Amino acid sequence: MDNELESVKLSIENNNNLRNVKENPVVSSVLLAPIKAIPVIGELLDLSIDKSLENFQQKKEQELIDIIFKNSHSITSDMVNDVEFIVNYARVREAVKRLATNDKVKFFGNLIRNGYLSGRHIQSSIFDEYINILNSMSYREILYLVDYKKYCEDCSKKKKSSISLLGRAYNNKFPQFCRDYSEKNNITQREIYFVFKHIEQTGFIEEEFETESGDVDENDNTFNSLSVDSTGYYITKDFLEFYEMVLKMDE
């Protein structure tokens, strides 16, 4: 690893050390203190849990650093000596600290690496949106959505079709996906629909509806009823941009 890269890594490490001096230790003040204040439960906590949590936090942060510096030959000191990068790196680091598992660490690392250290500079507003989405989406939601994207891609390749509709990435294949995915993963279609209903808030998918008119009343020439049924979800082009920036992993 060349001297330039070592300088970049030292800049980030110094930034981390400065933050650790200025703020209380995350393990004792942010995570353990509120729990220890709970009657009975606080008394049952073993002192060794401090060390376990500290090790867990260190592993997550090391994974974050490893992701950021993967394929890092093009990273320069100028890239990290940028106020916006430093502030947003600190935000990502804090978000990773609060993860209960390390499943999403790689996505936060991608956001920093692809947003600032890969030859482009992500817009501040888009960074805000993406980090908020990562904080709000569960790993299961991300996994289901990525699997649905791949399913739609496979269907498009088989039919050799392309989608040109405004905002739509692929045709709606949700009913078929639910059947196949539920059988493959031994889950219910109801569970899949529940997950996608929550994902809809991100704008990465949109529900599609089919409207069927009812019978015409011969007496007053009006409709007796109007039936509106959901036909599933299609993936929006916004998700493809998020996928390329945040979710896509190097092969």
Image (cartoon, rainbow, N blue to C red):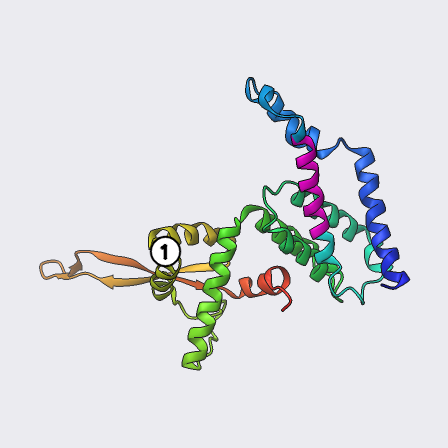
Q: Secondary structure at mark 1?
A: loop
User: Does residue 89 appear in this view?
Assistant: yes
Residue 210 sits in which quadrant? bottom left
Q: Quadrant of the N terminus?
A: bottom right
| 194 or 57, nearer to the observer | 57
Taken as a whole, is the magenta stretch helix, strand or loop?
Answer: helix
Horizontal side of residue 244 vs 79, given as left or right: left
Residue 33 sits in which quadrant? top right
Horizontal side of residue 9 vs 190, given as left or right: right
**Residue 127 image point, x, y percent:** 66, 54
Q: Which residue is mark 1?
A: 186
User: Does residue 168 appear in this view?
Assistant: no
Q: Quadrant of the C terminus?
A: bottom right
**Residue 175 image point, x, y percent:** 34, 63
Is residue 240 magenta-colored? no
Q: Residue at x 83, y 41 (%)?
A: 17
Residue 234 sits in which quadrant? bottom left
**Residue 94 image point, x, y percent:** 69, 42
Q: Residue at x 67, y 58 (%)?
A: 110
| 198 or 153, nearer to the observer | 153
Q: Residue at x 74, y 32 (%)?
A: 25
Which region is colored magenta? 49-63
Q: Answer above or below: position of 243 versus 194.
A: below
| 177 or 187, nearer to the observer | 187
Q: Amino acid at mark 1?
A: Asn
**Residue 117 image point, x, y percent:** 76, 61
